[in-house]
Amino acid sequence: MRSPIREQIIAAVLECRCAAAILVERFMETVLVYAETGTRPRIVDVVERVGIQYMLRFSLDDVVDTLYSSGIKVVLVDHDQCGKPDSLEVVRTIQQRFPSVQIIVLMKSVASQLYIQLIGEGAFDVIADYHVPEKLARQVERAAQTAQSYTEHRHAMAGHPLVEPEESNSLIGNSLEMIEIYKTIGQVARSNATVLIEGETGTGKGVVAREIVANSLRADKPFQVMNCAVGPETLLESELFGHEKGAFTDAKIRKLGKLEICNGGTLFLDEIGDMSPSTQAKVLRVIQEQAFERVGGNETIHVDVRLIAATNKSLVQLSKAGQFRWDLFYRLKVISIHLPALRERGDDVMLLAKSFLRKYSARLAKEVRGFHPMTVEILNACPWPGNVRELENVIQAAVVRCKGHLIIPEDLDSSLTAAVQEGGGSGIVEGDWGRVFGQLVDQHFPNLLRRCEGNLYGELTSALEASLIRRTLQETNGNQVQAARMLGISRNTLRDRVERFNMSGSEIS
């Protein structure tokens, strides 16, 4: 059963975000409010109205002193209201001194590298959509349970600082799927566990692999990439294991393979689903024994290499078909990361597009500053079969063609418009929806003015939104996960709208 006190705390966090940090203990009646502003934060008024006792502190030192004396075990940090020290330093300081304290960081929007760093430093979770009370309540409860478990078993959970990768190679996205990926990277990067990254071509599997390496204990050690679809088996094994002089016709000298070259570091096996069964057996031995022989050699080479693998194929299906070893599959999939297709990532399309626009505008020395609204509609409607890689290529070409400060539809490749039309988005591209809605507004405008004067915009947009959501939920038989994907919004946003419009089960199923 949920504590009424905790629900009141969540409501307070919901209503006011000006406090830099709130420390909460499950079923406690006292809240510690931390603000860097030095002024009374508005959240105090909310806490007082609901009758919760509280303590107000204006420095991290005072927070530390309070933690020493109070036994509080869960900390909520509002990243956007942190001054100096910032949220990363707050997490680091608390974790170093109180490893049993669980910290949840709240932020308005997610920066992937900061997210990974916070998790790596020991934050229990990072929540971007903390305005959803159910999620915050659930995470606070989980954090309290983890803190209790830590106390009982005295299991340390301290974190470590991470290596900052180049911005151009960083992951970008605020979708729930990407947030979970950031969390997983932060959790596994500093281990030596093998990682299997799955996803369609162009989703960014190589970027994820590099993020893992950049945030690992092997960040300053050798990193090698091996494309397992390079060609014949002999060429792959020569590149991977190396070969001795005379091993085959053109082997005129001994060659070290990538496994030896990156000894002490990390090897990224891309497209591992294309690897032959005999090579799979040798890679399995590397994972199990960290040993192998060069092609044409008898000497056993011992190495210390972490393996990260990626594939755009279903290894399960390949294993069922006898084309991939089950034992290797399970060895690779100690940690599994699935990258969603770009068409499933909603608003991430424009976040990525803007990032690529900045990148290529700077590289090409052009002052292209944004996208025409019609271009935005086209980009959002495109099915993106080539995923992030295709989007980057499209934006690069558009920047080259652009003659002004905005990317207009004419700057996009004609094949992109065709792809949108084939995918059922031709109405958006050609502007038909605008004409349909325009005709409706023209037809009913006099009545609308009489009935909705003073709130015309709100009434119409709410009615359209409610109708669209209701019809989509009917189409999915009430399945909110599928409906959110079809609408291009998060499940939390959909749940909020269902509650706001008081949609009953009979209406949406």
Image (cartoon, rainbow, N blue to C red):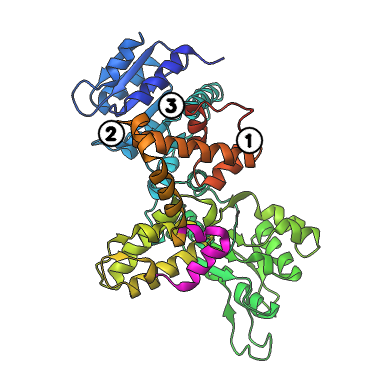
Q: Is residue 382 visible?
A: no
**Disc on res. 81:** 2
Q: Is residue 451 left or right of residue 472?
A: left
Give the labeled residue for mark 1.
478
**Residue 16 percent coordinates (x, y):** 32, 25
Q: Which residues are magenta?
A: 411-428
90 in relation to 381, above or below? above
Q: Residue 314's image quarter?
A: bottom right
**Dot 1: what SS?**
loop
Q: CA distance from mark 3 to mark 1?
A: 39 Å
Give the labeled residue for mark 3.
101
Foreground of the two, 441 or 113: 441
Q: Is residue 204 left or right of residue 234?
A: left
Q: Three-letter amino acid code at disc 2?
A: Gln
**Residue 28 percent coordinates (x, y):** 43, 12
Mark 1, Cα crowd under 10 Å, few <14 / some 14-19 / many 20+, is: some
Say if the magenta span includes residue 348. no
Quadrant where the C terminus is found in the figure? top right
In the rendered structure, which disc, 2 or 3, sits on the residue that comes first in sequence?
2
**Disc on res. 500:** none
Foreground of the two, 120 or 246: 120
375 in relation to 504, above or below? below
Foreground of the two, 157 or 456: 456
